[in-house]
Amino acid sequence: MTRSPHEPSGEPNPFRALALDRLRCRTSVKWRAYPDDVLPMWVAEMDVPLAEPVVRALTDALALGDTGYPAGTGYAEALAGFADKRWGWDGLAVERTAIVPDVMLGVVEMLKLVTGPGDSVVVNSPVYPPFYQFVEHMDRRVLEAPLGMDLRIDLDALEEMFRQATAGGRRAAFLLCSPHNPTGTLHTSDELAAVAALAERHGVRVVADEIHAPITAGGAEFVPYLSVPGAESGLSLMSASKAWNLAGLKAALAIAGPAAAADLARLPEEVSHGPSHLGVIAHTAALRDGSSWLDALLSALDDNRRLLADLLAEHLPAITYRPGEATYLAWLDCRALDLGGGADPADVFLRRGRVALSSGIPFGTGGAGHVRLNLATSPELIREGVRRMATALDRDGTGEGPGP
Ligand SMILES: Cc1ncc(COP(=O)(O)O)c(C=O)c1O
C-alpha cells in the first residue's frame, strides 16, 4: 500500500448532494420498483451524483459523437494503475485481460472456460442471489459451502464441497465473492492463499468476483485474489461499476493469472462486443482520475456504518449487525425479532414500515431471517430507514412506535 484509502480528500460527502425529491426523479430500478411512499434501501445502487472526472469524460465523448464501439486497452491500463497505487499490486498484466459486458456476464464466460454442462460451481452462502440464478441458467449445479458463524470462509466446509464437486473426476469451479456480498467480509491474504491451496489440491478452478474491491472500511486493505501465492490459475472479474455507481454504463474486465492465460485466450471474440463504449470511457476515467471522489465516498460510508450501528443499538437492539470491512451493504440478523409464523423480516418492514430492504432468503443457506440494507445514502435517509423499521415492529400497527 502506498497510500491510505481514507486520507481526507477535500471532496464533499457525495451522499449529501441529492435530496430525496431529486432521487425520486431517477428511473433506475432502485427508485421504480416500489411506490413512492416506500423508502428504497435494497438493490446495490448508490444515492450519489457521478464523480466529476466521469462526467467530464462522458460529456466530452458525447460532444464529439464518440459513441461507436470500444477499442484498445485503456480500461485495463487504468485498472492496473489503480491496483498498483491502491493495493500495492503490480501483477495485473494488461495482456491477460479482456473486456466483458458486466461482471455477471463475465462470471458466466469464465465459468464456461473452465467447466462444462452439469459440472458444479461452489459458492459461499449466503451470497449475492445472481450467483445461483446465472450459474443454474448456464446448466451448472450450485454447491453451497456456507460461511462460518463468524461470517468468514469455512475452509473445512469448502474442502468438503470441493471433494463432492470433483467426485468422479468432474471439472469444478469455486465462485469466490471478494469482498463478500452481503456480509461485507474482507478476505485476508492468508485466507485467500488457503483457498488457492485447497483449489489446487482438488483441481478446482477459482473465479473471483471482485466488483466491490475498491470499497473498504476504515482503511482496511483489500487483497486481490490473483496476488496471493498459489492463485496463478485463477480468474478474476473487476469493474468500476459498484464503487463509482456505473451499473448503467456497462463494462467490466476479466483478468487471468499467469496459468490461466491460455484459458482466457479461448474467450470468444464476440464477448468483447458486449461492453458499451461509453461504459468503457466512464470506467476508465473513474479508475484513472476518480480516487479523491472515492476517498470521500469511503469516509462517508465509514460514518454511515457507525450511524447505522448506533441507531440499531438504540431503537432495534434485537437486530444483530456486525459492520463488515467492505462493501456498502449491511447484513442484518433479524432472527431474534418476534415476528411470528416464520415471517420474512423484509416483508414485514415493507408492509408495515414502507421501507424496502433485500430479503435474505434468495441469498441461500444462512439467509433466512436476515435482511440486507444499502448504506450508500445520506445519514438522513439512514435515520428515516431505521425509523420505518422500528415503526414496522410497533405491535399495534398504528405507526406511532418510538423512532429515531
Ligand atoms: C458481488 C456482485 N457481483 C456482481 C454484481 C453485478 O455486477 P454487474 O452489474 O457488473 O453484472 C453485483 C451487484 O451488486 C455484486 O454485488
Image: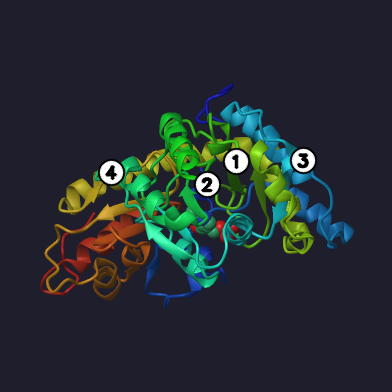
List the residue tagged with mark 2. 206
What's the distance in space between the residues labelled 3 and 1, CA to CA?
Answer: 15 Å
Q: Earlier in the sequence, mark 4 or mark 3?
A: 3
- Residue 64 placement (x, y as % from top left): 89, 57
Q: Are marks 2 and 1 in contact (CB under 8 Å)?
A: yes
List the residue tagged with mark 1. 233
- Residue 172 placement (x, y as % from top left): 50, 54
Residue lying at the far bottom of the rendered structure: 35
What's the distance in space between the residues labelled 2 and 1, CA to CA?
Answer: 8 Å
- Nearer to us in this view, 154 or 375: 154
- Residue 95: numbered disc: 3
Rendered image quadrant of residue 259: top right
Mark 4: which amino acid? Arg
Q: Are marks 1 and 4 in contact (CB under 8 Å)?
A: no
Label 3 vs label 1, nearer the camera: 1
- The quarter of the picture where the C terminus appears is bottom left
Q: In the image, 66: left or right of 232?
A: right
Mark 3: which amino acid? Glu
